[in-house]
Amino acid sequence: MYATRHCTVSRSMLLPVVLSILLIHLEITHAVAPKLTKRQSAGIVRCVKASNVLGCGTFECLKRTDRCKLGGLALLCSKFQRKTSNFNQLGRTFTKQSLRCMATQIKSDFQRAGRQCSQIENFVSRVQADCYRSNNVCRAAMSNYRHFKQILLPKDILTSRSFLQMFQSILSCGEAVTLKFRDTVTSALGQSFLSMLNYLQKGATSPLIEILGQEWVGSAQFRAIENEVPGSSPRQS
């Protein structure tokens, strides 16, 4: 009886820790780390500098190469923009200001981020975390949590660093806020949660799709996650 109760509490309390570990692994490079060519990097820099900080144009520039996985922020931006009309004033202000903040920092500093994919991904994550914090993601998430949860679907949190970073920022807001969002992942993972922890404990700590491989997207486990979420649709490439 004691063991069962202890396990249940541990799962709930470990989720923020697990998400932190997922982010940490993305700072570790492999022996042959993906890297942008000088031409690819220059093309993104030109696109970013010419982009408008309003809208998602700056983030779309990051998708100009498949070598690095940089498309998540453009998707996150478009999903937030589509939902903006459903938010209260706090949510609308947060969306507008945080997106502008991220676009401005990327325009200003991208060319100094380096050409290694891991360097660029870490740079984008730092920009996200800084802009979410400075634009009060906690208040916006608390007062718009139902709409935020429709954007931050478990399948995206588990497969995209940008979605994972935003979810991590929300989980750092304190217990009152995190309680509104914790079920987003735990209800979808169910019994698979301890299996994920096992993968992480073996040293694999990037988003789950990088742990299990692309073929996992077509697996029964991944379909179960999608089916657990009302209104979710199959992931588009």
Image (cartoon, helix red, strand yellow):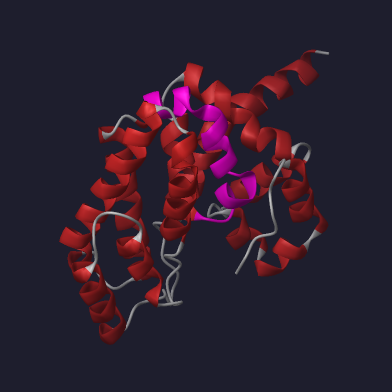
The quarter of the picture where residue 212 lies is bottom right
Q: Where is residue 119? Give x, y as percent.
A: 31, 63
Q: x, y (%) of residue 41?
A: 27, 78
Q: Quadrant of residue 9?
A: top right
Say how many tags the image has. 0
- Foreground of the two, 114 or 234: 234
Rendered residue at 63%/35% (across/down): 184
Is 41 rendered above or below residue 185?
Answer: below
| Quadrant of the image containing the N terminus | top right
Q: Going by the image, does 52 lie left or right of 148? A: left
Point 72% across, 39% down: residue: 188
Q: Is-magenta flag for residue 142?
A: yes
* Residue range corresponding to the magenta coloring: 138-160
**Please, what is the dominant secondary structure of the magenta stretch?**
helix
The furthest residue to the front? 85
Q: Is residue 125 magenta?
A: no
Q: Residue at x 20, y 61 (%)?
A: 107
Residue at x 70%, y 45% (from the top left corner) = 231
Instruction: Compare residues 213 and 29 and report the one nearer the observer.
Output: 213
Query: Would residue 208 be found to the left or right of residue 132 on screen?
Result: right
Residue 217 in the image: above or below residue 230 = below
Residue 22, given in percent of the width and then of the height, sits at 51, 48
Query: The C terminus lies in which quarter of the figure?
Result: bottom right
Q: Determine whether, in the image, residue 34 is placed left or right of residue 132.
A: right
Whether residue 96 can be seen here: yes
